[in-house]
Every structure is written in structure tokens, then in C-alpha cells.
Amino acid sequence: MDFDKFLLRISKIKNIPLPAESSQFKMAPPFRVELLKKHKEQMQYAKKAGVLALFYPDVSQQTNLVLILRKTYNGVHSAQVGFPGGKLEASDKSLEEAALRETFEEIGVPINHIEVLSQLTQVYIPPSNFYVQPFLGITSEIPMFVKDETEVEAIIEVPLKHFIDDAVVVSKMVPTSYKVEIEVPAFKLNEHIVWGATAMILSEIKDLLKQLM
């Protein structure tokens, strides 16, 4: 979609209610309800993080969404696709500020180039005991991405027309932090399999966009 048309339609996002968990659970792993029950006590002490779903124009003025492939490391989110963002630091005044700061640090988009349009529905991540607060934002500039070589393996630029195509929703067997493979709903975006919390957030975004498009 042409970015100017996208801006016109996305400007109405605050006028529609969030689909929230009804949307997120379309892309939730099959054991999510059981995990939430199991982690009920732990959730009270969960850490907090902010992430950003950033839409922007490419050189042909078509609308894209940026995701990142994380580095391989000794942790539960190793080599997974996610949004730019990260944990709330003592210096951050809010989760939105944390999301913007981390977006600049991880992919090099200046904070003053980004307009945050909406806060989305938070997601709890059991393996790392994090509550993640997503935000939806835009930049009208064509980004000059600079990836953080210590944390980001690749920057993934997903065309909007590809993201909203229902054909990108698949089922895949994936390894989990619980040392078992399970079949999960996922998005296949630019040949990357996106599942878990990121897919749940994307599901809410997709449902919102379909109401606006």
C-alpha cells in the first residue's frame, strides 16, 4: 500500500477498540493457557519491556514493517524474530520511552523521527518472565537502518501487502525453551518463521489494520 494512503487510514486507529486477547490467542502456542496458570505467582514479579511495531515508507513509497532477527546466544529468545525494543531501564520514564530508546539502539532509527500512534495489548512471556508492552508507530522518513552488531543478526523489512496476506499464516514445528518441539501457529515473513509473543502481537496489529484498510 502507498504510504500516504496508509497514513490516512492508520490515523483513525485511536477510534477503534483493541481486539486484545481475542486476537492474540489466534496465534498463541497451544499450551499458553496452562503456562499462564502455572506462572500465576511468578507473574506478579515479572520484569517489564517495551517494543515497537514501526511502519515506514520504502524507496518506492510502499509501506513496510520492520522486525529483527536476534543473535544466537545462550538465552530463551536466541535466534528468534521479534520487534525492536527491550527491557525498562532505570533511566526510562515509561515503557514507551524504553521502546523508542531500544529501537534507536538496535536499528538506528532516531527517536525524533518516530510518532507513536497507539499502545497495544501487553503480552506475558513465561520463559523469561517478562510483561511486554507493544506500541505501534510510524516514521515518514525512509529509514537508514544501522543494526546493533552485538544483539541483531538481521533487520527484516516486511512489505505491508505481504504481512496482511492470510497465506503467510502457517503451522510449524518449533523447538522451545522447555526442550521439546511443538506445533504452533506462525507467520512466515520474508522466509522467517515468527511465532510466540511476536506472532501474538502481530495478530492484533493485523486485525486492527484490516478494520482500517
Image (cartoon, helix red, strand yellow):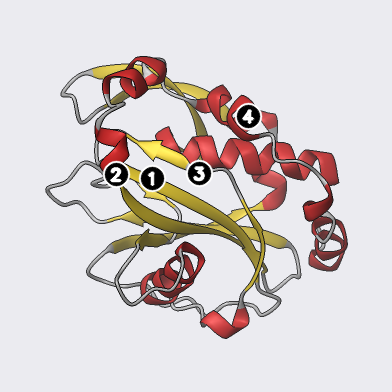
Q: Is residue 130 left or right of residue 108?
A: left
Q: Which residue is mark 4?
A: 23
Disc ID at residue 131: 1
Marks 3 and 1 in Cβ contact (< 8 Å): yes
Marks 3 and 4 in Cβ contact (< 8 Å): no
Mark 3 or mark 4, earlier in chain? 4
Q: Image point 46% across, 57% down: which residue? A: 51
Marks 1 and 2 in Cβ contact (< 8 Å): yes
The mark closer to the camera, 3 or 2, is 2
Q: Which residue is mark 3?
A: 122
Going by the numbered disc 4, the residue's amino acid type is: Ser
Q: In the rendered image, is residue 192 in sight?
A: no
Q: Which residue is mark 2?
A: 46
Q: Is residue 207 left or right of residue 10?
A: left
Helix, strand or loop at disc 1? strand
Going by the numbered disc 2, the residue's amino acid type is: Ala
Q: Is residue 154 left or right of residue 28?
A: left
Residue 127, image x and y in percent? 25, 35
Mark 3 or mark 1, earlier in chain? 3
Marks 1 and 4 in Cβ contact (< 8 Å): no
Mark 1 or mark 4, earlier in chain? 4
Q: In the rendered image, is residue 91 in sight?
A: yes
Are there few (<14), some (14-19), or many (20+) residues within 10 Å of tag 1? Answer: many
Disc ID at residue 5: none
Going by the numbered disc 3, the residue's amino acid type is: Gln
Helix, strand or loop at disc 2? loop
Going by the numbered disc 1, the residue's amino acid type is: Tyr
Q: Image point 73% across, 42% down: which residue? A: 208
